[in-house]
């Protein structure tokens, strides 16, 4: 690891000033829990000259845990364990509680989760160059791409790694930001269009800090992860659903797929097909969820995901319709 300076500013204004372009340091970087950032530094993927630690800022808004807003510094464990949130918006706790291990969840923050870097193994190895670094080719295309996209939305074939990002999509979520000329960004606008920009992790400038996540209540919501192994791992495919119901009939649905595209992949055609269906009508539910793979263009090694995706979406829809704690989703 390269030598770097370290600082722990007192407030977010000071933190953004330190990471603003044209400051005293050429490559400053923000750190929350450090779970992803320190990995990248240790692997030689990144060599910041200043680490700006957000964990010692004295600001209760960063740690708030309310039913429609959580602070950016809230940990995945806090989100997963909040009884109030599990009642009002179960999809968030399920997505947070399924990520990583208890040790990681105790440190990893929600802001860092939204902004973590890709898990593409070619990107994660300093020996490989690629389109997302400085290169002009993607070694995953002809290489081992079993955990890569089935929707080729751009030349980089990575899948978005965050469990929370698709949940925030279906919740119509926003992030509070400081350090720039805007105060909020819809999470649907947080990530760049992968056809136009395949190198940036988000649209935030280096000085912009996420201070909180805002979202609507959604008691009928669920997340399902299909994993290769049930202990710590990123999902092969994940399904997200928020429903409104009249009795057992779906009156409105918002679904999204995770781990299949460079950004969370909303499924409006599934949402439309689900309206008017009884959650007990298995045949119609299956038919609606089969539509999740419309437009898929899988790679030879990722084609198996087209069989998994309709299952993940259907299980998420079924779990969202079932208000019991037991069936609120998580790992499947
Ligand atoms: C073994 C293991 C398994 C995992 N499995 C999963 C999984 O299944 N699903 C999943 O979603 N994740 C998984 N993760 C990833 C983990 O959840 C993230 O690495 C973690 O949430 C990052 O949060 P952090 O606070 O440590 O961020 P950091 O490492 O501190 O930061 C991550 C990035 O975000 C930026 N950043 C951090 N905070 C802010 C802020 N407030 N404003 C602006 N920029 C900021 C940093 O500059 C950095 O680039 C796993 C990690 C491990 C180690
Ligand atoms: S999928 Fe993207 S990150 Fe991975 S090797 Fe290809 S260009 Fe790089």
Image (tube, rainbow, N blue to C red):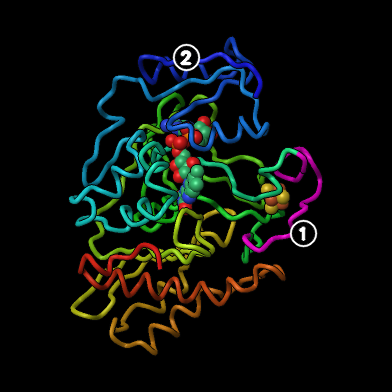
Task: Quadrant for residue 186, please give it.
Answer: top left
Determine whether, in the image, residue 209 is placed left or right of residue 135. Answer: left
Task: Quadrant for residue 200, please give it.
Answer: top right
Disc 1 and disc 2: Cα gap in Å? Answer: 40 Å
Going 77% across and 43% down the picture, which residue do you hit? 128
Is residue 81 located in the magenta-colored stretch of the structure?
A: no
Q: To which residue does mark 1 refer?
A: 143
Which of pointers 1 and 2 lies earlier in the amino acid sequence? 2
Going 35% across and 72% down the picture, which residue do you hit? 317
Going 52% across and 41% down the picture, which residue do you hit? 116
Q: Where is residue 1 in the image (x, y as percent from the top left)?
A: 65, 24
Specify whether residue 189 is in view: no
Q: To which residue does mark 2 refer?
A: 7
Secondary-structure class at tag 2: strand
Is residue 133 located in the magenta-colored stretch of the structure?
A: yes
Q: Which mark is residue 115?
A: none
Q: Residues within 10 Å of mark 2 (few under 14, many from 20)?
A: few
Depth check: give the residue in front, 8 or 1.
1
Q: How crowded is mark 1: few (under 14 residues within 10 Å), some or many (20 or more)?
A: few
Q: Where is residue 207 in the image (x, y as percent from the top left)?
A: 50, 24
Vertical order, 250 against 142 (above or below): below
Depth check: give the residue in front, 293 or 139.
139
Q: Does the residue labelled 2 lie within 8 Å of ligand 1?
A: no
What is the number of callouts on the image?
2
- Quadrant where the C terminus sits is bottom left
Q: Where is residue 212 in the image (x, y as percent from the top left)?
A: 34, 36
Vertical order, 273 against 114 (above or below): below
Q: Where is residue 112 in the image (x, y as percent from the top left)?
A: 45, 38
Q: Is mark 1 within 8 Å of ligand 2?
A: yes
The dominant secondary structure in magenta is loop
Q: Give the range drawn in magenta.
A: 127-147
Task: Quadrant for residue 295, please give it.
Answer: bottom right
């Amino acid at each position: 690891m390269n030598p770097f300076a370290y600082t722990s500013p007192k407030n977010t204004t000071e933190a953004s000033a330190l990471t603003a372009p044209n400051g005293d340091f050429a490559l400053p970087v923000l750190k929350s829990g450090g779970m992803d950032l320190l990995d990248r530094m240790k692997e030689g993927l990144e060599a910041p000259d200043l680490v700006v630690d957000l964990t010692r800022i004295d600001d209760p808004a960063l740690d708030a845990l309310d039913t429609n807003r959580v602070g950016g510094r809230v940990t995945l464990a806090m989100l997963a364990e909040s009884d109030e949130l599990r009642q009002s918006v179960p999809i968030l706790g399920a997505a947070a509680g399924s990520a990583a291990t208890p040790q990681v969840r105790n440190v990893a923050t929600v802001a860092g989760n939204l902004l973590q870097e890709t898990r593409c193994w070619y990107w994660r190895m300093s020996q490989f160059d690629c389109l997302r670094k400085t290169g002009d080719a993607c070694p995953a295309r002809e290489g081992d791409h079993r955990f890569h996209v089935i929707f080729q939305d751009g030349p980089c074939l990575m899948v978005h790694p965050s469990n929370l990002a698709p949940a925030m999509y279906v919740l119509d979520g926003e992030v509070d930001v400081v350090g720039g000329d805007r105060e909020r960004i819809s999470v649907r606008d947080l990530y760049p269009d992968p056809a136009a920009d395949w190198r940036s992790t988000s649209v935030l400038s280096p000085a912009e800090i996420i201070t909180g996540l805002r979202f609507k209540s959604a008691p009928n919501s669920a997340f399902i992860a299909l994993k290769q192994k049930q202990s710590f791992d990123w999902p092969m495919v994940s399904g997200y659903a928020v429903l409104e119901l009249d009795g057992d009939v779906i009156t409105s649905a918002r679904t999204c797929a995770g781990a299949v595209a460079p950004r969370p992949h909303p499924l409006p055609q599934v949402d439309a097909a689900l309206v008017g269906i009884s959650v007990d009508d298995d045949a119609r539910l299956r038919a609606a969820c089969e539509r999740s793979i419309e437009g898929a263009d899988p790679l030879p090694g990722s084609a198996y995901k087209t069989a998994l995706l309709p299952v993940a979406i259907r299980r998420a829809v079924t779990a969202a319709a079932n208000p019991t704690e037991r069936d609120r989703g998580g790992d499947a």
